[in-house]
Every structure is written in C-alpha cells, then in structure tokens.
Image (spheres, rainbow, N blue to C red):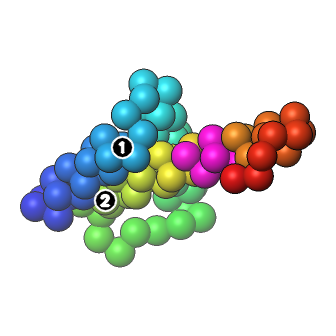
Amino acid sequence: MQLSLTLAALSIGLWWTFDRSRSGLGLGIGIAFFATLVSQLLVYNGVYQYTSPDFLYVRSWLPCVFFAGGITMGNIGRQLEMVSVKIYTGGPPP
C-alpha cells in the first residue's frame, strides 16, 4: 500500500513539475483509466493473468504508470508539434 501511495504522489508530482495544464491532467487520468480498463478486460478474458493482484484484481501501481506515461507522451507530442510548426513556417531551428 505504501508503494502505491508513493507512486500516486510521484505521478502527480511528475504532472506538476513538467506539465501543470488541465489538458495534461485530463489526458493522464483518461489514459490511466482506459488502459487499466483494457488490462482488466484482458485479465477477465484469460488473455493475461496477474501473479498477485492488490486491489479489485488490479496491480495498484498500474494506473500510476499509465498516468505517468500519458503525461510523458503528451509532452513529447507537444514538443514535436512545436518543432514541426517551426520547420513548416520557416522559423529558426530549435
């Protein structure tokens, strides 16, 4: 339980440090929810199996990892978009 709470705090800290936008928070929460839902469907259908689920047949760290991944991918996508706009409009290279 302590590991799960620590990962949740670190995930929120990651968002606060690198993003701080409502859209980034929504993206992280949405990805964490849907990715956990998909993994649950895979477990329910017998495609995948956890060795020791923590909470409601879910590893409690899984949504935290998906949240952090959503924030990271959102920031990478935002940076790539800024670079492509500069290149397309003939702006100075980054």
Judge whether 48 appears above or below 24 on screen: below
Going by the image, does 76 lie left or right of 6?
right
In the image, what residue type sits under mark 2? Trp
Going by the image, does 53 lie left or right of 80?
left
- Name the mark on residue 78: none
Q: Nearer the viewer, residue 86 or 51?
A: 86
- Indicate yes or no whether the magenta region holds residue 29: no
- The magenta segment is 75-80
Q: Nearer the viewer, residue 6 or 37?
A: 6
Find disc 1 in the rendering and name its residue: 15
- Name the mark on residue 61: 2
Q: What is the quadrant of residue 88 in the picture?
A: top right
Q: Residue at x 87, y 34 (%)?
A: 89
Q: Residue at x 72, y 41 (%)?
A: 81
Residue 63 in view, yes or no: no
Q: Residue at x 81, y 40 (%)?
A: 91
Going by the image, does 24 lie left or right of 64?
right
In the image, what residue type sits under mark 1? Trp
Residue 30: give x, y in percent of width and height: 49, 34
Cα gap from disc 2 to disc 1, whole angstroms: 16 Å
Residue 28: give x, y in percent of width and height: 45, 40
Dot 1, how many residues are within 10 Å of its Cα: few (below 14), some (14-19), or many (20+)? many
Please report whichever mark, 2 or 1, sits nearer to the chain's N-terminal start. Answer: 1
Dot 2, how many residues are within 10 Å of its Cα: few (below 14), some (14-19), or many (20+)? some
Residue 14 in view, yes or no: yes
- Indicate yes or no whether the magenta region holds residue 76: yes
Q: Secondary structure at mark 1?
A: helix
Residue 80: give x, y in percent of width and height: 71, 48
Residue 3: give x, y in percent of width and height: 17, 64
